[in-house]
Image (spheres, grey):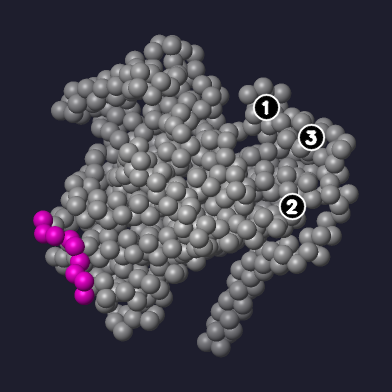
Amino acid sequence: MEGVLTGLVGGLAIVFTPMGFFYVALGTILGISVGAIPGLSGAMLIALTLPLTYYMPATDAIVLLIGMYVGSITGGLITATLLRMPGTPSNVMTTFDGYPMARAGKPGRALGLGIAASFAGGIISWWFLLLLAKPLSIWATRFGPFEYFTLILMAMVLIASVSQGSLIKGLIAGLLGMLVSMPGVDPSSGMPRLTFDTYHMNSGLKLLPVLIGVFAVSQIIADVLDIGRKIERVESTKSSIMIKAGDWVRHGGNMLRSGLIGTLVGILPGVGASIGSVIAYTTAKNVSKTPEQFGKGSEEGIVASETANNATVGGALIPLIAMGIPGSVIDAILIGALMIHSIQPGPTLFITNPDIVYAMIAACLIGNLVMLAVMTGSVNWVAKLAYIPRTFMLPVIIVCCVIGAFGLDNVMFDVWVMLIFGVIGFLLERARYPLGPFVIGFVLAPLMESKLRTGLMMTGGSITPIFTRPVAATFLAIAIILLVWPLVSEWRRRKAEAGTSAAG
Amino acid sequence: MNERIDPRVEIGVALMLILIASLALFGTKDIPPGRFEPLGSAPVPQAVAGMVLLLALWIIVRACIDRRPIATPSADRYLDAAIVVAFTLLFVAAMHYRLTTFAILTTLYLVATIGFLTRFDRKRLIWVIGIAAAVGFGFQYLFTRVFVVDLPGL
């Protein structure tokens, strides 16, 4: 514990340098601004910012991106409340109660509760991040290649099974992401594969053009489709949005419960803020004394949703820091950011780059404090960003995408890759394939393959340790259960339906 | 959610996935087996591509036998999206062949795209041209002089 506190002090010292604090604050403000603009997301912002961080010191780059992560989840609250349009997918549940409360003449109250809940969620999960990341990383250093292989396998199945849409489509998206990561010179053998004799492909399809394409370009195409959509609008408030001490006490239990749910969901690999807020909202409704108020402007609904979605941020950073496994799509991009700065994520990160780890943890705390100050002080200004005409904004973002993809290696090949993956991402989304598993598959596949091949080299080609080593066998068993359970529950549901219709 | 996606979209996307998986299988067929390690470079991509192929086939079969009602298509502006994508392809191609500077190409692209999305409304056209030029030349200055990043184009 002493080591953790010493490290935290070191991290705070980094963040509280003038440039460190500037980058955290800038990241948080940009994150809030982008989160407040419907159609733009934190993942898009972070993917587009990555190229600008090449020339920055690694700690500055990472604290900037962490600030963006924290800010973007919260910024979506504003449009969810005032426009019934979630700024990010994780704010969908907030629209159910935030907008009705705003329409009932209490927009300030709705925003105030949402901001306070977001802060509470961020701080609750931050404590878990501080306390759990190091012990978990120490445990993970005992993993051999087979444990790592099965852990990633479990993570991939988990991501596919809890993603929106069908399990099959989640699996296909994850597998496609893995496949797309495989072209290039094979690091294990030095042999080029899937390069189709194109020298540009020798270094493979790079993370950044693929990410920008899948998250930014595909989103812009989708945004153009509904560019003419009319936005319902409630004016923001001129009065103070600070909630009273009594409100903190009254909603404390809900905040704590939703914060714990959000943190736990965040820790699960690839399960994002959207699912955290849905579970917390449903739980709050189930235990509420006034469940009939949910969906009509319930304070408990806003608090549950906003606490949980912000709590997933700290939760999702735990597996990233401890094991190099992304807890969400944005974490997958952060892994890419670490690798761009020659930092290898994984359980040894605490040993090789403790400054980076504690700067990330400190930035998460400071980002939440900046978020509280910015949102409380300037929510009316931030709300105006939602009205920027998208006809002007979207083409400018495409130009930023082109610069971002080109800036990686100064080759137009990467820009073409970005465009192709923009179209592929758009088509996948149209057919309701989740994009989260795609990105996480893309990031994790090289690690998964290298661990499998290292393990096979150690055992002379035998996969027996997967079944005989307790941790590896446990991960494999969980993966199989996660894969089979949705099929079994679907079969049971159909059987029950058939029974009901036969009885009727 | 008792409505299904338009089977043409479902099957079209599944065919695209089958094409990608087939390309991967074709591209790995001549990779020799591993010499210093048991697995080699080919089996993992082949296994992954094989699974994509099988699951995509399953999606096609399911789309063909599904009898649920098809989701009503929203009044989306598909033509607008297609034209914006076409403008973007031209923009990138022009930069690829270095037809002129980044600033000029970006200005032209933004005038064309924003102008098209605003239906070349005369009242807003002057704003469109102004903003396009400000972004085009502003970005060129910002990225080459402040961030010192190379830009595509001449």
Q: Which residue is mark 3?
A: A189
* Camera sees residue A224: no
Query: First in sequence: mark 1 or mark 3?
Result: 3
Query: First in sequence: mark 2 or mark 3?
Result: 2
Q: Position of residue A324 (x, y in %)?
A: 59, 50
Q: Position of residue B48 (x, y in %)?
A: 71, 47
Q: Which residue is mark 2?
A: A145
Cα distance in 3D space between marks 2 and 1 = 26 Å
Whether pointer 2 and pointer 1 mark residues with C-beta atoms closer than 8 Å, the reply is no
Residue at 71% x, 38% y is B24
Query: First in sequence: mark 2 or mark 1?
Result: 2
* Three-letter amino acid code at the position of disc 1: Asn
Residue at 44% x, 69% y is A260
Discs 1 and 3 carry the same chain letter: yes
The answer to whether residue A332 is left or right of residue B36 is left
Cα distance in 3D space between marks 2 and 3 = 18 Å
The answer to whether residue A61 is left or right of residue B68 is left
Q: Label for residue A391? A: none
Cα distance in 3D space between marks 1 and 3 = 14 Å
Q: Secondary structure at mark 3?
A: loop
Residue at 41% x, 43% y is A14
The magenta span reads A238-246
Report the chain holding disc 1.
A
Q: Which residue is mark 1?
A: A202
Q: Residues within 10 Å of mark 2 (few under 14, many from 20)?
A: many
Report the chain holding disc 3.
A
Residue A235: in magenta span: no
* Camera sees residue A372: yes
Report the chain holding disc 2.
A
Q: Secondary structure at mark 1?
A: helix
Q: Magenta: predominant secondary structure element?
A: loop
